[in-house]
Amino acid sequence: MIMPKKIFLINPPFFHIPGKFQSQAVYTEPPLGLAYIASYIRKYYPGEANIRIIDGAVMELTKEKILDEIQKEKPDIVGASAVTLTSIFVKDLFKEIKTLFPECLTVAGGPHATALPFDMTPEVDIIVIGEGEETMVDILKWMDGCSDKRNIKGIAYMEEGRQVLNEPRPYIEDIDSIPFPARDLLPMEKYTHQYMHKSTTKGYSTILMTRGCPFNCRFCGVRKMWGSKARYRSVDNILAELHEITLKYAVSFIFFIDDTFTANRKRAEAICHGIINTGLEIKWACFSRVDAIEPEFLALLKRAGCVELQVGVESGDQNVLNEINKKIKLDQVREAFAVIRSSGLQTKAFFMIGNPTETKATVKKTIDFAIELNPTYAFFSILIPFPGISIFDEFKGKGYIKTFDWSRYNWYGDPVFETENLSKKDIIALQREAELRFYLRPKKIGRYAMDAIISGQFKVLFRNLFAFLSIVARR
């Protein structure tokens, strides 16, 4: 083991992107992907790894400030995670790093790098495709002269002007073998949530319990990054991490970011019983599919500390749901939200505007459906045809996509596409109509005010209000 190297891992900022206030003003989440990579490197180089994570998003760092840190520390390796809308920032940053420090190795991973690896070159020396933990360790071994670059699975790079794509890396089957994220390298006190609950006045974190997704929704890129098979951490492993983050980092509110937390009911029940039996005093929220919601199950979730379920509804038109392969029925959605309301849990429903085959009429049906369901919160985002999802290929083939400026691929930015049925102007107007019709109702306004009074979460209320007004004002 040689590796006395200095490694910087960077989470790019979002503030330079049009419309960033819609996401960053409301809440910020720790970059678990980078923290997992840091902990995995530590596992293989115990006591030797010199790693620093720079969270440019939560710290709102400019490119110049990040470069200042790099000039001061002079790391041997700089890695970054790139989603589509931050990929240009990462490329520009790495270009300047290579100018200042030609010997510094630049590495990029994440959803965009996985979907379009050679979109990141030549500014990036090595692209990591898919899961990055084992790949980063192999890159370090190669730098130490212990292996051949051509034998590193799951990377892409340029060599003498040629594009080189190495053999794919198999997914890590035993994800319990990955140490808990290195949260000690993150500014944990900076992360904020969007939940109005009286117990959420201090620490916040996210936790990931599963990798991979067995579902195949056409608007989602999870399978591209993590695979189509769900790989589960053991219940004991999850409970151990929950205890660590509550005790070590004073976290009182947790968001389970798994897309399918409730899909495996037996396992979800075991986690809930573990939380209850070990006396963990936490509140939490999670995603759920509508076909996993039953009264007895929700009662258990609530006993274990759950305060909110987040549900992807996407559309109020059955034909649109079928088109995007959502595999749910509108009546299932109605029944699920009725059950959730009876349970006393808060709900957050997600809807998308601009799905394939969508028309003004189907969007208006979606707005009506959202009002009928009456979740605690509703998010009406404009569809983004991200590289790596099937809708991207369809829209690109049909000429619907109007810009490949990735910094515009923002959930609450202007649409990057037009279809035969919907112009950009139509899509913007429909999103504004959805926001106004759903939120500007006397009962809704009164509910939010009462929640803020009961919980004392006035900062959350005002952040949410600012985000809402920003969206409407831009329209």
Image (cartoon, rainbow, N blue to C red):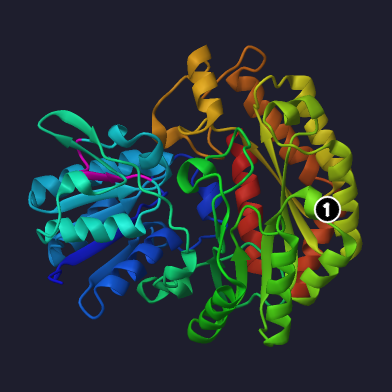
Q: Mark 1 packing: few (<14 Cα in 10 Å), some, or many (20+)? A: some
What kind of residue is marked 1?
Answer: Lys
Picture residue at 73% right of the left edge, 19% below the top: 359
Picture residue at 18% right of the left edge, 43% below the top: 150
Q: Which residue is mark 1?
A: 444
Kindly tell me whether residue 102 is visible in this rendering: yes
Instruction: Give left or right: position of 188 versus 99.
Output: right
> Percent x, y for residue 18?
46, 39
Q: Secondary structure at mark 1?
A: helix
Residue 124: say if magenta: yes
Magenta-highlighted residues: 122-129
Residue 234: say if magenta: no
> Percent x, y for residue 319?
78, 25
Q: Is residue 99 above or below residue 261?
A: above
Instruction: Give left or right: position of 182 versus 244.
Output: left
Magenta-drawn stretch, dominant element (helix, strand or loop): loop
Q: How many marks?
A: 1
Q: From the viewer's side, name the closer residue of 72 and 115.
A: 115
Picture residue at 43% right of the left edge, 23% below the top: 403
Look at the image and tell me in which quarter the N terminus lies.
bottom left
Look at the image and tell me in which quarter the C terminus lies.
top right
> Percent x, y for residue 360?
74, 21
Picture residue at 24% right of the left edge, 41% below the top: 92
Q: From the viewer's side, name the closer residue of 404 and 270.
A: 270
> Percent x, y for residue 434?
74, 36
Q: From the viewer's side, name the closer residue of 210 and 62.
A: 210
Would you identify the image quadrant in which residue 298 lies?
bottom right
